Amino acid sequence: KAGVTQTPRYLIKTRGQQVTLSCSPISGHRSVSWYQQTPGQGLQFLFEYFSETQRNKGNFPGRFSGRQFSNSRSEMNVSTLELGDSALYLCASSGGTYTGELFFGEGSRLTVL
Amino acid sequence: GIQVEQSPPDLILQEGANSTLRCNFSDSVNNLQWFHQNPWGQLINLFYIPSGTKQNGRLSATTVATERYSLLYISSSQTTDSGVYFCAALRSGGSYIPTFGRGTSLIVHP
């Protein structure tokens, strides 16, 4: 069974640009959640999608958005990039129940210059 | 929201030593997981353990849900065990917002 796939793995952007990251969950998993990891703030929850609907949202500004497609693949977008958006972005998939085990992808490392 | 605290923040061991990592959480949980973050950043699942005890090779974990803590035991540590260990908790009550601890950074010297 293939694991969670995130693309791209590494990317460099400049301030003011936007970026789109992609996450393909484990086959059969309907929930995809996104996290930001920085040295200062640790791992923080961004949002979670289940069956194409945003079910939960963390405390991030509106520049951070996401969506989920009918095949459960998800994308997250960050607009008007700031230096502080430099981080490792991780996505996780699960079956979707509130007790479900999370499985993470390898992450997308974003550097904003 | 739920608070998750991990201790110790840093741990340095010689190869072959044993260690115990602790995760305290402030509320009832539906889900408690332990992860190992590898040098490339990926979070590797170690245990899904909202309660009870599990073992996988040299690693084992115990969660005492009524006392709101979980322990990760690493026996006969190896250099490949180095990295950061995270616990993550999902509070009972339906809000699907996992909270992660700050992690324990483990260095195992040969």
Image: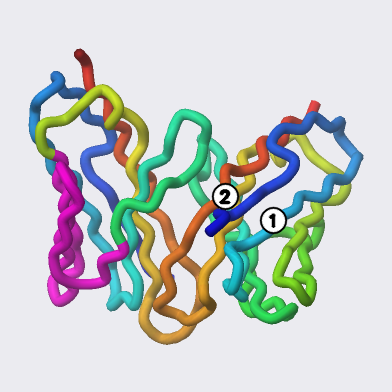
With B4 as the anchor, is A89 left or right in this view? right
Q: Residue furthest top?
A: B110
Q: Which residues are magenta?
A: B48-74
With A63 as the anchor, is B54 left or right in this view? left
Amino acid at circle 1: Cys
Percent position (x, y) of residue B104? Answer: 30, 39
Q: Dot 1 lies on which element?
A: strand
Asked if the residue at tag 1 contacts the one at tag 2, i.e. Cβ–Cβ closer than 8 Å, the answer is: yes
Residue A25 figure quarter: bottom right
Residue drawn at point x = 59 percent, y = 73 percent:
A28
Residue named by callout 1: A23
With B106 as the anchor, is B96 left or right in this view? right
Q: Quadrant of the C terminus of chain A?
A: top right
The Cα–Cα distance between marks 2 and 1, rounded to whole angstroms, is 8 Å
Up-down relation of residue A94 to residue B56 (above or below): below
Q: Residue furthest bottom?
A: B93
Q: Dot 2 lies on which element?
A: loop
Is B50 magenta? The answer is: yes
Majority secondary structure in the magenta region: strand
